[in-house]
Image (spheres, rainbow, N blue to C red):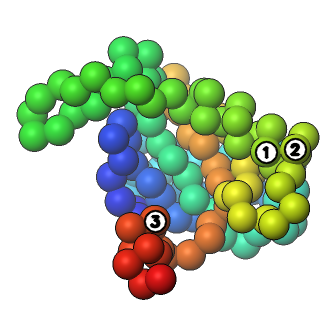
Amino acid sequence: KICDTLQGVLYQAKIYDTNILIDAADQDEKNNRVNIIGHVDKYDTVVIKKTPKKLAHAKLAKEDGFDIIVDEDIVKEMILMHHVTFDNKPMGGYCVDFVNFFESDTDYYLVMEYVGSYNLLQFTQKA
């Protein structure tokens, strides 16, 4: 687990033989192997954003026991990332690559390129 997000959790995972092994700490999907499509050979480590469907559809986040209305949409995020990765790749290579998107009965999973251990705040403070 890397950190919590507004609507879920961010995990770091390793790719093995063109399959992804979801973080074993995730009790709901423990040891679940999911076939990856796309340019998997390019990555050995990825980030998986897990968002519960219930929160995504209601556009809610949980914080300190309160429901907060948010403008987050993991499906739109996936569509945008796919477009920027495959259809309209920026020349500088400064956008995080889309790797895959899949879902279970209860959650959405967005698989992205792992770019390091810095978040945007840490990066700007260091710069």
Identify the residue position indicated by label 3 in the image: 120
Q: Mark 3 belongs to which amino acid? A: Leu
Front residue of this view, candidates 79 and 23? 79
Q: CA distance from mark 1 to mark 3?
A: 19 Å
Under tag 2, what secondary structure? loop
Q: CA distance from mark 1 to mark 2?
A: 5 Å
Q: Is residue 27 among what the camera can see? A: no
Identify the residue position indicated by label 1 in the image: 84
**Residue at x 62%, y 70% (from the top left corner):** 115
* Structural crowding at the residue carrying mark 1, measured as other residues with C-alpha within 10 Å and reported as few (<14), some (14–19) or many (≥20): some
116 w.r.t. 63: above or below: below
Coordinates of residue 102 in the picture (x, y in percent): 65, 35
Identify the residue position indicated by label 2 in the image: 88
Q: Quadrant of residue 82?
A: top right
**Residue at x 47%, y 58% (from the top left corner):** 11
**Residue at x 10%, y 40% (from the top left corner):** 64
